Image (cartoon, helix red, strand yellow):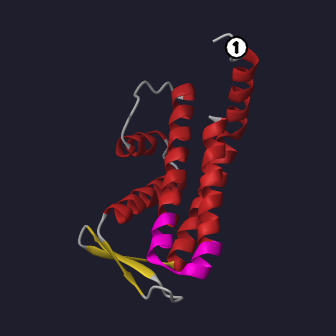
C-alpha cells in the first residue's frame, strides 16, 4: 500500500511539472490533456489505496476491477464529503479525457479544452486545471494522513516477513 501512495505522489509531481513548467512555455491542448491524464492516474492510485485499506480494516470482500466500480465502493465505504467531492472530480476528469474536444487559443495564455459532457459544455483552461490540481493535492495529503501510519506498518510487516521466503 505504501508503494501505491508513493506512486500517486510521483504522478502528482509529474502533473505539477506539466502545469507549472511545461504548460507555461508551450500552452497547447496536448499539454492540458497530458496534465489531466496524470491527475487521473494519481486519482486511480489513491482509490486503489483506499480499497486496499478497506479490505484490511473494513473486511471488504469485493474485488472491483473497473474504475467506476471502485469509485462506487469507496463512496459507499467512506462518507466524508472530501472523499465524495474528489471522486466526483475524478469521474469528471475521466469523462473529459474520453470525450471529443476542441482546443481554443493554442499558444496563448487562455489556451482551453472545450468539450460537451452530458449536454453541458466543459471548459478546461490553465486556471481551472490549477484549481483542480490544488484540490487533488489536498486530497492526497488527506489520504496520506488517513492511511500513512497503517501503510508504513503494513510495509514494515511485509519486509519483516521477507520476500525470500515467498
Residue 152 visible in this rendered orientation of the protein? yes
Vertical side of 113 occupied by 60: above or below = above
Seen from this angle, which residue lies furthest left? 119
Q: Residue 157 in the image: x percent, y percent?
A: 72, 21
Q: Is the magenta stretch mostly helix, strand or loop?
A: helix
Query: What number of labels is visible?
Result: 1
Residue topped by disc 1: 164
Q: Quick check: 25 left or right of 157? A: left
Residue range (magenta) = 20-34
Q: Give whichever of 131, 65 is nearer the camera.
A: 65
* Magenta stretch contains residue 29: yes
Residue occupying image coordinates x 51% and y 71%? 31
Residue 134 visible in this rendered orientation of the protein? no
Seen from this angle, which residue lies furthest top? 165
Quarter placement of the N terminus: top right
Question: Callout 1: helix, strand or loop?
Answer: loop
Q: Residue 56 in the image: x percent, y percent?
A: 56, 26
Q: Quick check: 162 left or right of 76? A: right
Vertical side of 107 occupied by 5: above or below = above
The quadrant in which residue 113 appears is bottom left
Q: Quick check: 10 left or right of 152? A: left
Vertical side of 70 occupied by 63: above or below = above
Quarter placement of the C terminus: top right
Q: Give whichever of 159, 18 is nearer the camera.
A: 18
Q: Residue 140 in the image: x percent, y percent?
A: 62, 53
Residue occupying image coordinates x 72% and y 15%? 161
Residue occupying image coordinates x 61% and y 80%? 24
* Magenta stretch contains residue 59: no
Amino acid at each position: 500500500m505504501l508503494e501505491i501512495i508513493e506512486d500517486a505522489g510521483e504522478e502528482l509531481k509529474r502533473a505539477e511539472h506539466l502545469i507549472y513548467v511545461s504548460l507555461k512555455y508551450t500552452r497547447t491542448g496536448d499539454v492540458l490533456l497530458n496534465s489531466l491524464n496524470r491527475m487521473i492516474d494519481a486519482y486511480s492510485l489513491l482509490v486503489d489505496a483506499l480499497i486496499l485499506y478497506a479490505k484490511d480494516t473494513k473486511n471488504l470482500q469485493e474485488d472491483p476491477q473497473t474504475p467506476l466500480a471502485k469509485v462506487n465502493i469507496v463512496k459507499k465505504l467512506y462518507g466524508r464529503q472530501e472523499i465524495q467531492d474528489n471522486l466526483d472530480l475524478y469521474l469528471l476528469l475521466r469523462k473529459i479525457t474520453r470525450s471529443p474536444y476542441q482546443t481554443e487559443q493554442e499558444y496563448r495564455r487562455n489556451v482551453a479544452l472545450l468539450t460537451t459532457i452530458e449536454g453541458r459544455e466543459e471548459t478546461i483552461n490553465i486556471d481551472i486545471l490549477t484549481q483542480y490540481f490544488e484540490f487533488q493535492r489536498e486530497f492526497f495529503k488527506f489520504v496520506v494522513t488517513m492511511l500513512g501510519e497503517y501503510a508504513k506498518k503494513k510495509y514494515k510487516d511485509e519486509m519483516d516477513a521477507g520476500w525470500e521466503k515467498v
